[in-house]
Image (tube, rainbow, N blue to C red):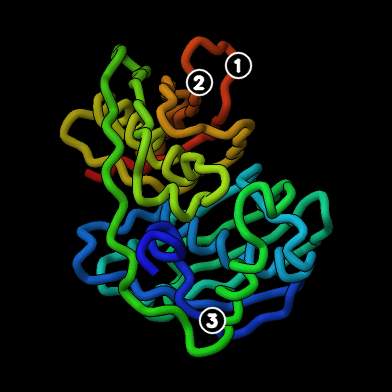
Amino acid sequence: MQGRYAAFTFVDRITSFEPGTAARGSFHIPADVGTFPLSLVAEATGQLAAWAAMAKQDFRVRPVAGVAHETLYLGVARPGDLLETEVRIDSCDDEAVSYQGLARIGGAIVLELRDCVGPMLPAGDFDEPEAMRGFLAVLLGSGAPADRFRGVPGLPLAPLAAEPGFAAARLDVPVDAPYFADHFPRRPVLPGTLLLDCMMHVAAGVVAASRPGRTPVARKVSDVKLRAFTEPGATLELRATLETTEGDTMIARLEARAEGQKRPIGGARATFEVAR
């Protein structure tokens, strides 16, 4: 199971399953992967929702990243932790899936997804439907082999501009990476959660520069919109602009633009607390 259902699949087992309605699952974070950012916790929760949605629509279609009203960062995930996810599907058809989600570690909520919408696209354009049905059967049965995930290689960010309240960086998407085997076999694209994680890094730098000596801690990402796919080898410009500051809370606007394009391919707002 090297690469496929290993490099970027964050569900080991599904413990409760009502297609198109609700699901619960688990994923053991391998102890030796170094880090496991909350962006991957969000990915794990979204993947559980995707299995419930695809099963409901008999794998004719599959959801892709679209809109997330709000993601709350309520804790941390560490290598060695057991991540337990659950989702509630509000609506699901061949056009889109709408859902809510939670992720827990040791019974404590570490992340909450609110009002997420994933547009549905033909499943066969991205993956082999029969292979997906087969892997779902594994997840619903004995479960996939634990600790098959080997980590995500870091994405290099090259600074382009920095001034008070603003920063920009270039992201060169690799031509090849292990996660493309999972995301997706028939149409490899950069996972939206990894793109968002990179934008958050740029924003954290803006916040840190505005409060020297303080440590920015991400608390919420809101108004996430992903408008286009990013293919292997693409070059993006990521921007973060500080919008509001109230006490120890700071909000930054995030944007991602493809090289030579004026219209953003993605964006969000990130809320940080500045620890004393």
User: Residue 152 in the image: x percent, y percent?
Assistant: 31, 51
Q: Does residue 251 appear left or right of residue 54 in this picture?
A: left
- Amino acid type indicated by mark 2: Arg
- Amino acid type indicated by mark 3: Val
Q: How crowded is mark 1: few (under 14 residues within 10 Å), some or many (20 or more)?
A: few
Q: Mark 2 points at which residue?
A: 257
Q: How crowded is mark 3: few (under 14 residues within 10 Å), some or many (20 or more)?
A: some
Q: Which residue lies furthest to the bottom in this view?
A: 142
Q: Please, what secondary structure does the residue beneath circle 1 have? A: loop
- Spatial CA distance of label 1 from label 2 is 7 Å
Q: Going from the N terminus, do you reach mark 1 or mark 2 first?
A: 2
Are discs 1 and 2 less than 8 Å apart at CB? yes
At horizontal 27% and vertical 42% (from top left) the residue drawn is: 154
Q: Going from the N terminus, do you reach mark 3 or mark 2 first?
A: 3
Which one is closest to the eye, mark 3 or mark 2? Answer: 3
Q: Mark 3 points at which residue?
A: 138
At horizontal 69% and vertical 74% (from top left) the residue drawn is: 22
- Spatial CA distance of label 3 from label 1 is 42 Å
- Amino acid type indicated by mark 1: Arg
Q: Going from the N terminus, do you reach mark 3 or mark 1 first?
A: 3
Q: Please, what secondary structure does the residue beneath circle 2 have? A: strand
Front residue of 132/251: it is 132
Q: Does residue 84 appear left or right of residue 173 in this picture?
A: right
Q: Name the residue under label 1.
A: 263
User: Residue 129 in the image: x percent, y percent?
Assistant: 67, 63
Which one is closest to the eye, mark 3 or mark 1? Answer: 3
Q: Residue furthest left?
A: 213
Taking the image as drawn, is residue 247 in sight? Answer: no
Quadrant location of residue 168?
A: top left
Locate the C terminus and report the quarter of the image it occupies. Answer: top left
Q: In this rendering, is residue 156 above or below 276? A: above
